[in-house]
Amino acid sequence: MACMLLFSRVVPSSNRHTRTCICLFSLSLSLSYLCYCLIFSSDAIMQKTSDSTQNCMRLMSDGGKKLLHKSLFCTLSSDSRGTRELSLHQGNQSNGTLNLNTVWNNTDRPNNNTGNVKFGNKKLPNAIIVGVKKGGTRAVLEFIRIHPDVRAVGTETHFFDRNYDRGLDWYRSLMPRTLDSQIAMEKTPSYFVTRETPRRISAMSKDTKLIVVVRDPVTRAISDYTQTLSKTPDLPSFQDLAFQNQSLGLVDTSWNAIRIGMYALHLENWLRYFPLCQIHFVSGERLITDPAGELARVQDFLGLKRIVTDKHFYFNRTKGFPCLKKPESSSSPRCLGKSKGRTHIQIDGDTIEQLRDFYRPYNIKFYEMVGHDFRWE
Ligand SMILES: Nc1ncnc2c1ncn2[C@@H]1O[C@H](COP(=O)(O)OS(=O)(=O)O)[C@@H](OP(=O)(O)O)[C@H]1O
């Protein structure tokens, strides 16, 4: 319209046809220029992205850990590099995509990968922490996932016990993206005591590596009860639940908190589907006193280089547990959340002694089966 007005002054009104032509010509020129700008600016963006992706793929195919770190690093946009580089070099990466926000005070959440960088494929887990509840499963998962060759689902999927009907594709979709060189993991502690789980995992893959974090069954039962009590304050007493008849020493094995600790019984079921060498047992006690030692064995079992070592841990006096050293770049806590490492309710010595007597034969059988004495006395 502006063009018509302008030209109505310059070109005589008799020559309306010429005026329209000139206007159309200018309009098409403007549009062409606009298109040109759009095409070339988007090309420049695409060029940058594909350059960095190719660079990454090249670096990744080189395989080495340093190169892998570089490959993660190189996909970041230049303005974010400064802030992320430090945490990467300090082992705070979340493998595959950058975990910009390793949430330690809320560890039951999935990886909080807020970066846009996505590569690798979702695959079914190569290794699963199958138990035991209150054994220290969260600590093992959080400690092992700082390894650059491990990626893990943060939440408990409960696929093999509660969600099996959803199918393997659903299960796979929950997995983090992994490179071929990385292993995918999840942890659901209830698997260890669920009858169908060993068969189902074996049907998924006979090669799945299994990790069981075991802990003195008496302490484990008290820990389990303490957790339930924190959610259900009007729960009957521990003794009421643990015994059918306490004066006769009759333990109630139908109570889950007791049943879970009968490790030998559950293990028998697993050994029907997996050879013992495919199951690794972590000592829940040593995990607290020597996390690096336990993690060394876990890494060996998973066929990983020993990258998680004692230099990653420190003992936090306030929490009373080992925590991960935090990177200087981050102020986020690196201890497990408040629900891990609770103060247990007080149980009288006689009750503890009765439960020790009850568990002793199961413990001895378990030590024999796994070829290791965990010294739960
Ligand atoms: N580093 C570190 N920090 C905190 N807590 C630690 C750690 N290592 C092992 N533990 C022990 O882990 C126990 C909780 O076990 P789980 O993670 O398997 O519990 S759960 O089944 O997922 O609820 C938890 O049990 P409670 O002490 O009874 O709370 C801890 O004793």
Image: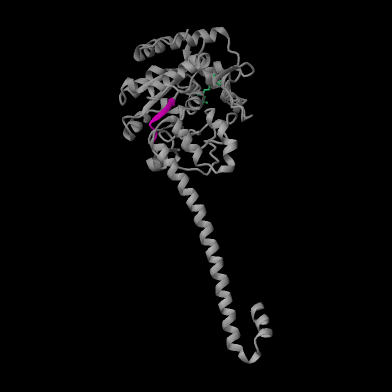
Q: Is residue 342 magenta?
A: no
**Quadrant assignment for the N terminus:** bottom right
Q: Say which of 148 and 65 sits in front.
A: 65
Report whether 130 appears left or right of 1: left
The vertical placement of 104 against 315, above or below, is below
Q: Say which of 321 and 201 sits in front.
A: 321
Who's the residue at 57% across and 25% down the image?
Answer: 336
Residue 102 visible in the snapshot: no
Report whether 225 appears left or right of 362: right
Count of marks placed on residues: 0
Q: Position of residue 147 (x, y in %)?
A: 47, 27
The vertical placement of 22 against 285, above or below, is below
Start-end of magenta stretch: 124-130
The vertical placement of 240 against 72, above or below, is above
Q: Position of residue 235 (x, y in %)?
A: 59, 24
Q: Position of residue 156 (x, y in %)?
A: 48, 33
Colour theme: one colour
Q: Quadrant of residue 225?
A: top right
Q: Position of residue 360 (x, y in %)?
A: 43, 9
